[in-house]
Amino acid sequence: MKITLADIAQKANVSKMTVSRVLSGKGQVAKETYDRVMKIVEEFGYQPNWLARGLASKRSMIIGVIIPKIEHMFLDNYITQVLTGVVDIAVENNYRIMLCPVETKPHGNSEYLNVARTKLLDGMILLKTKVNDPNIETLANAGFPFVLVNHKKYSKKYNFVDSKNIQGAKLAMEYLYQHGHRKIAFVSGSLDETNGKDRLKGYIESLERFGLLFKEEWVVYGDFNKNKAYRFSEKLFLDKKKMPTAIFCADDYMAIGVMQRIKEIGLRVPEDIAVIGFDDIELAAYVKPALTTIRQPIYELGKTSTQILLNLINDKQKTPVHRLLDVELIKRESA
């Protein structure tokens, strides 16, 4: 038997408004009343009609999460941690999410613009967008609510949540320098992303601070791709006399690929070459040797961006919102 909000109110001897407050978690309800209503809800297995709610409020009660379409994207610990934060806040606020993997197009409209035009979504969270993506500007000019994650752009039109990537890179470099390393290579992330550019900037500024020369041959462009980092890092080991003694990688997956290559050529981590990553994905603590890394609050990126988006949707927050989250050095065995 299908049970309605009115049925629950009648059985609990309360108003429909009270039942709505119990289910939404908004407004004050006495504990005795809350317990009585929830007992009936659980007994009859009541499920709210989200579509009807959206029609009544002229909202869909759905937010879109735009992620890059990459190989094995659902095995990517970074993406899953961000999504976990997004889902926790969305569900807490009676929202659902629509996951939209999209391919980056150098010219023309992106798929996420087409989704926005359908009015199916109340807002969007955009993860790892490209530096020169013209579609972000189009979205902003249309007044559509959105928040960029791990993409830093100071503009009155844009809202973003990012980590302090430059500071994180400097923490890694300072740690290596303090441990006697003067030959420090860098495996760069994608320079089409602001976090990739910022981590490279932190590396270069640290070299300048410590009076060390920047050597182009000691920079590997891994594009946040473990396989590329594994293959391209080989150039660092061709001349054993001119090899770096430490390698700072712009993310943990690339660091894991580099450590595998180091082992295959018969060298040891950290005895011969120290390695530091960035992100602190779950796997970082379980590889051998355990990875020293810069922890960015990946789960918090998802939570914070979703709360900001909901505030924008509900007119509780005005654009722009520019939020940078703290990072920290996590010391393990690899450096």
Image (tube, rainbow, N blue to C red):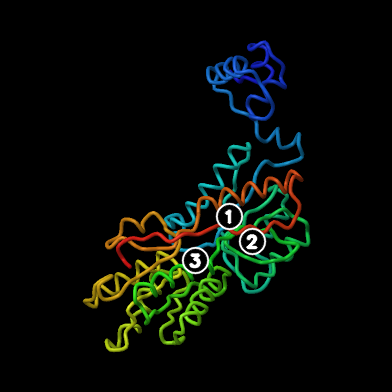
> Going from the N terminus, do you reach mark 1 or mark 2 first?
1
Question: Where does the image place residue 24, in percent across and percent down from the top left?
Answer: 65, 30
Query: What's the residue type where badge 3 is placed?
Result: Gly
Q: Nearer the viewer, mark 2 or mark 3?
A: 3
Label 3 close to label 1 by CB (< 8 Å): no
Viewer-nearest of discs 3 and 1 = 3
**As drawn, is 145 to the left or to the right of 33?**
right
Q: Is the residue marked by circle 2 packed among few (<14), some (14-19), or many (20+) residues within 10 Å?
A: some
User: Gap in Å between the C-alphas at discs 3 and 1?
Assistant: 30 Å
Query: Which residue in the structure is indicated by mark 2?
Result: 111
| Amino acid marked by disc 2 | Glu
**Real-space CA distance between mark 2 and mark 3, rounded to the nearest whole angstrom:** 33 Å
Residue named by callout 3: 168
Q: Which residue is mark 1?
A: 100
Q: Earlier in the sequence, mark 3 or mark 1?
A: 1
Horizontal side, residue 218 vs residue 143: left or right: left
On screen, 185 above or below 160? below
- Quadrant in which the C terminus appears: bottom left
Q: Position of residue 135 (x, y in %)?
A: 69, 66
Contact (Cβ within 8 Å) of mark 1 with mark 2: yes
